[in-house]
Image (spheres, rainbow, N blue to C red):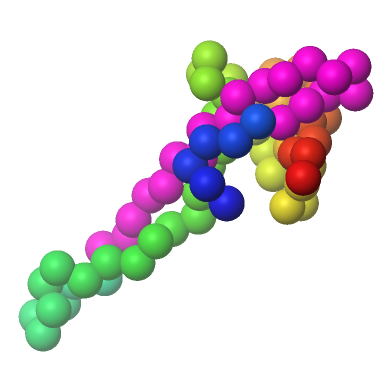
């Protein structure tokens, strides 16, 4: 999934979604710079948080409104 994409509500309104990626340090004495990618978080460009329901469906936390990614 790209770092930014559009999703739509049932009325056809478009929302711009940003994917925030985090990394977890796995460093030890043999590889002090090791890291792996953690779970992504999803935010509306304006700052509202989203829950991922599945690959194509998201829910706005504050309102419960469902958004769908169109192919």
Q: Decide: is 1 above or below 26.
A: above
Q: Is residue 12 magenta?
A: yes
- Magenta highlight range: 7-25
Q: Decide: is 61 above or below 71.
A: above
Q: Residue pushed farthest right? A: 10
To which quarter of the image does residue 6 belong? top right
| Residue at 14% over, 68% down | 33
Most foreground residue, 4 or 29: 4
| Residue at 53% over, 14% down | 46
Q: Residue pushed farthest front? A: 71
**Is residue 49 visible from the viewing direction of this image?**
no
User: On the rendered structure, is 56 left or right of 1?
Assistant: right
Quarter containing the C terminus: top right
**Is residue 51 visible from the viewing direction of this image?**
yes
| Residue at 85% over, 19% down | 12
Q: Is residue 24 magenta?
A: yes
Q: Residue pushed farthest bottom? A: 30
Most foreground residue, 26 or 47: 47
Q: Position of residue 54 (x, y in %)?
A: 76, 51
Q: Position of residue 23 (x, y in %)?
A: 34, 56
Q: Position of residue 53 (x, y in %)?
A: 76, 46
Q: Position of residue 9 (x, y in %)?
A: 83, 24
**Chief secondary structure of the magenta span?**
strand
User: On the rendered structure, is 55 left or right of 22?
Assistant: right
User: On the rendered structure, is 32 left or right of 54?
Assistant: left
Q: How many marks?
A: 0
User: On the rendered structure, is 47 left or right of 58?
Assistant: left
| Residue at 52% over, 46% down | 2
To which quarter of the image does residue 32 belong? bottom left
């Amino acid at each position: 999934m790209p770092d930014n994409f559009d999703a739509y509500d049932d009325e056809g309104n478009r929302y711009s979604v940003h994917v925030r990626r985090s990394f977890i340090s796995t460093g030890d004495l043999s590889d002090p710079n090791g890291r792996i990618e953690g779970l992504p978080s999803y935010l509306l460009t304006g700052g509202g948080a989203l829950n991922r329901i599945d690959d194509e469906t998201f829910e706005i936390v504050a309102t419960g409104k469902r958004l769908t990614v169109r192919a």
